[in-house]
Amino acid sequence: MRSGRWMLVAWLIVGTLAAGQRDYYTRFDGSCATIATIGITWASGPLNYIGLNPTADCKVPQPSE
């Protein structure tokens, strides 16, 4: 069980580094799409380095007039 935890931590660290290399942190504007893209990049971990480029598009509903 211990090795599984370390593998998960390493997986997330690699995803965090990939998001940093793509400048997601410096271009952070607080939008739903940016937050979701960073989260997906973290979760996909090393898959980012074999060609996966996850992005997200969020549309928050606007109140009616």
Image (tube, rainbow, N blue to C red):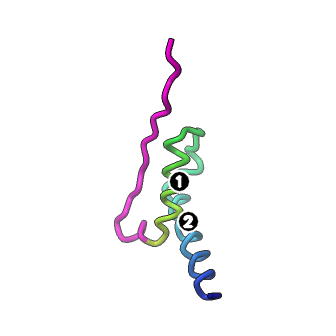
Query: Tag 2: residue type?
Result: Leu
Residue under the point 42% across and 42% down: 57
Taking the view exactly as shown, the residue that stands out farthest to the front is: 64
**Left/right of residue 45 with respect to residue 13 in the rendered view:** left
Q: Secondary structure at mark 2?
A: helix
Taking 11 as reference, is 3 above or below it? below
Q: Which residue is mark 2?
A: 17
For the residue pair 48 and 4, the one nearer the viewer reads as 4
For mark 1, what is the residue?
38
The answer to whether marks 2 and 1 mark residues whose Cβ atoms lie closer than 8 Å is: no
At a point 34% along the width and 66% down the height, the residue shown is 51
Q: Is residue 20 above or below residue 3?
A: above
What is the magenta range?
A: 47-65
Label the magenta part by its dominant secondary structure. Answer: loop
Q: Tell me the SS state at disc 1.
A: helix
Question: Left of 11 or right of it: where is 48?
Answer: left
What residue occupies the far left of the structure in this picture?
51
* Residue 64, image x, y percentages: 50, 16
